[in-house]
Amino acid sequence: MPPSPLRAAVSLASSALLILGTFLPWQVVRYEQNREVFGGWRLAAGEAGVCLALAAVGVVAGWSFTRARGIVAALLGRLALLAAGGVAAVVAGLQALRVAEKLELPGLSSQPGMGLVVVGVGGLGLLGAGAWAAWRPAL
């Protein structure tokens, strides 16, 4: 597989989005005139840790696009990006659904924060990089 700096850049940028989204607000709670935000670490430390691990997978797979050669490296890199992107997108989607559930208290509302959007976009970016990656080396 010839080196692919553009594919690597997409993978690395998507991984950076996953890292950034982990530290942005995942939930915004409004009650009366007050507003409280909860980041990934305060709201769901386990899922935030998973997002950071998936970002690390994206970085390693992206770096392999510039260094590794051969059909095994191409296949493993692509599968790693597809798996990491899929899991990140599912984590963001499930967290957004959980956060957006209707609350039974009057005057209290909860909605997903920008961090979940950024994590979701990063996951979709890793999926895109994995779909774009070569299955086999160029002849």
Image (cartoon, grey):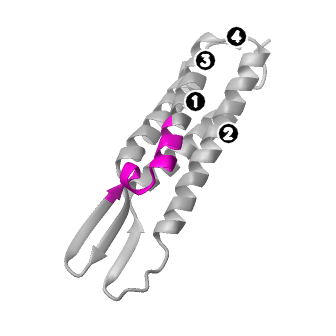
Assess whether mark 1 and mark 2 are in contact (beta carbons under 8 angstroms): yes
Mark 4 sits on what residue?
A: 69
- Give the main secondary structure of the magenta stretch: helix
Assess whether mark 4 and mark 3 are in contact (beta carbons under 8 angstroms): no
In percent of the image, x 64 and y 46: which residue is there? 86
The residue range painted magenta reads 38-52
Whether residue 129 appears in this view of the structure is yes
| Residue type (three-letter) at the residue carrying disc 4 | Arg
Mark 2 sits on what residue?
A: 83
Assess whether mark 3 and mark 2 are in contact (beta carbons under 8 angstroms): no
Q: Nearer the viewer, mark 4 or mark 2?
A: 2
Count neighbours of disc 2 (C-alpha within 10 A) and say few if under 14, some if 14 to 19, many if 20 or more.
some
| Residue type (three-letter) at the residue carrying disc 2 | Ala
| Residue type (three-letter) at the residue carrying disc 1 | Val
Give coordinates of residue 22: x percent, y percent. 41, 45
Give coordinates of residue 26: x percent, y percent. 40, 57
State whether residue 106 is above or below residue 40.
below
Distance from disc 3 to disc 4, alpha carbons, whole Å, reads 8 Å
Q: Looking at the image, is mark 2 or mark 1 earlier in the sequence?
A: 1
Q: Looking at the image, is mark 4 or mark 2 earlier in the sequence?
A: 4
Give coordinates of residue 120: x percent, y percent. 52, 51
Question: Across the whole image, how many numbered discs are drawn on residues?
Answer: 4
Depth check: 22 or 132 in front?
22
Q: Tag 4's secondary structure?
A: loop
Mark 1 sits on what residue?
A: 57
Q: Nearer the viewer, mark 1 or mark 3?
A: 1
